[in-house]
Image (spheres, helix red, strand yellow):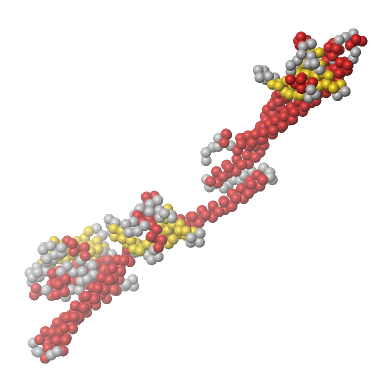
Amino acid sequence: MNKIRFYKSIHLKIVIIYVLLILIAMQVIGVYFTGKLEDQLVDNYNDTLFERANLLAYYSMEEMQRDEENEERSLSRRINELYPDLFNNDNTDVQVIDKNNTVISVSNLRQRSNIGQRTTNFRVKRALLGTEDEVTLINEVTGHRTRVIAIPIYSDDDVIGAIYIEASIEDIYDQIQEINQILMTGTIIALAITAVLGILLARTITRPIIDMKKQAVVMGRGDFSRNVKVYGDDEIGQLATTFNELNNKLQDANATTEAERRKLSSVLTHMTDGVIATDRDGKIILMNKRAESMLEKKQDQVLGTEITKVLNLDKFMKHHDLYKITDPILLDFDYEEEETILEAHFSVIEKDNGKQKNGLIAVLHDVTEQEKIEEERREFVANVSHELRTPLTSMKSYLEALADGAIEDPEVAPRFIKVTQTETERMIRLVNDLLQLSKMDSKDYHMNFASIHLPKFLDQVVERFEMSTKNESIDFEYKIPDKDIYVYGDRDKLTQLLDNIVSNAVKYSPEGGEITCSMKVEKERVIISIKDEGVGIPKENIPHVFDRFYRVDKARSRNLGGTGLGLAIAKEIVLAHGGSIWVSSDWGKGTTISFSLPYVEEGIDL
């Protein structure tokens, strides 16, 4: 989390708020106070000025009505003596005018020249007519304010003169300005004190908040080991207490979640099925190890990739189409080593009681072996059906012919009966071979193992075929070392193994051909090879010669009485003895079938 700059911090905001509140309060108080004070001072000054003007008017009226003959002083002089008691301000100019508009007295010595002159001031004229006049004038040059009043002098309801006064009121506004300065200084001092107090108060508020912020950062990293310090019982203290309770609950929830996550991870890791999870857009967010193995892709490589692309479904459907699939689908992957077939089951991740689809879970089963077994089963059933149908059809035809009267023909009947016997024997061999394979496929199948002297055993088996093929002019050549070599195996099954291989060599050897039987020891195994001089096997057919019911030349094999199971049985016998079997062939030159058996150092000479 980025560090908060000071000018963005709540600490500064609280201080600014307090300072602004005090500033606004002081400004409101200052404006209201100075406004009221100004109005009060001006009103008081006007009242005082009017009172003094009225007193001057009264005294002037008395002086004007005195008999000047008995007075040693003139009227102007007597009135002038009144000014010091009434107007002791140098900023006030007073004039007394008689009813003839003649100035009879002035307070300002500079205006003595106006005494005895007639005034033209319209306010004086209005006062002589009995109308009081007052106004505040502002000098356009200096901006000074002057209070001007003109009042009449009455004598028994008759106007005998007027008082004209010009009084500067700048002293009042100077006082107000000084008061404003005092208020400004007080405001600054109050703001400074408020700022200090605000900082201290803000610290008491922000300290627990900062602690909670630090704790939130630590909690975000997964550490729930510490708690926030509680500073009091106020709202912030209650918030800190609630925060600690939340921390403890989150710690418990996180521990539970982590335990469940580990369980889920363990389950996903050890599952035999692959699991893929997506978000609502069909993009992969999780894939377990088994799914990685099945798809041969790492989770890091496919995170954020649409599941349809990973499962090779993007050419046929979009991710939202998978929400509608309820039945499993088969996925065919052709890898370099082998073909893999997966069965995919899709389930929808829902939230808000199924109102919204939030993703998919795909469970993958490897059904390659099951599909192969099923394919082999279908092929096996088809082959068995075909192998049984051919002799049965032939037998039916000959038996129908015999039933229709051919049995009475001494030349035809024996031949037809011979054919039915041959086909019956062929079916018996087929059934026996099938029973043999079925027994060997069974888990309960047991063999009787014993120590066998391999050179003597091989010689006995081959010699039997050599005796039975004398009329076919087939020569047998032996390449068997003259020493004691033992294997551990089932004599009957090994006899059947050699019978199947040697009988195939005899069947496909031309008249006058040669069959070579060889044996050699390599490390811990004995290798036995049977080579004929037949037509051989094409290269494309060699990988399939040990498959059940497989024939290179089907027509010739059936004519020779083969069931297509001999080499398949031979393979099962070799594998049961812990060995291996293989074939090598050159087309037109012959075939060599070889198999290996574990070598035993010492044994019993049988």
Along the viewing direction, whichever of 255 and 161 lies nearer the viewer: 161
Quarter of the view holding residue 114: top right
Along the viewing direction, whichever of 180 and 413 lies nearer the viewer: 180
Q: Is residue 86 left or right of residue 346?
A: right
**Residue 564 position in % (x across, y down):** 20, 71
Instruction: Tell me what residue is drawn at x 11 percent, y 84 percent.
Output: 415
Q: Quadrant of the C terminus?
A: bottom left
**Residue 155 position in % (x across, y down):** 87, 21
Residue pushed farthest right?
70
**Residue 421 position in % (x across, y down):** 17, 83
Instruction: Tell me what residue is drawn at x 73 percent, y 24 percent.
Output: 135
**Residue 18 position in % (x across, y down):** 66, 35
Q: Does residue 417 show up?
A: no
Instruction: Tell me what residue is drawn at x 36 percent, y 57 percent.
Output: 318
Quarter of the view holding residue 70: top right
Instruction: Tell me what residue is drawn at x 89 percent, y 11 percent.
Output: 68
Depicted 273 relative to depicted 150: above or below: below
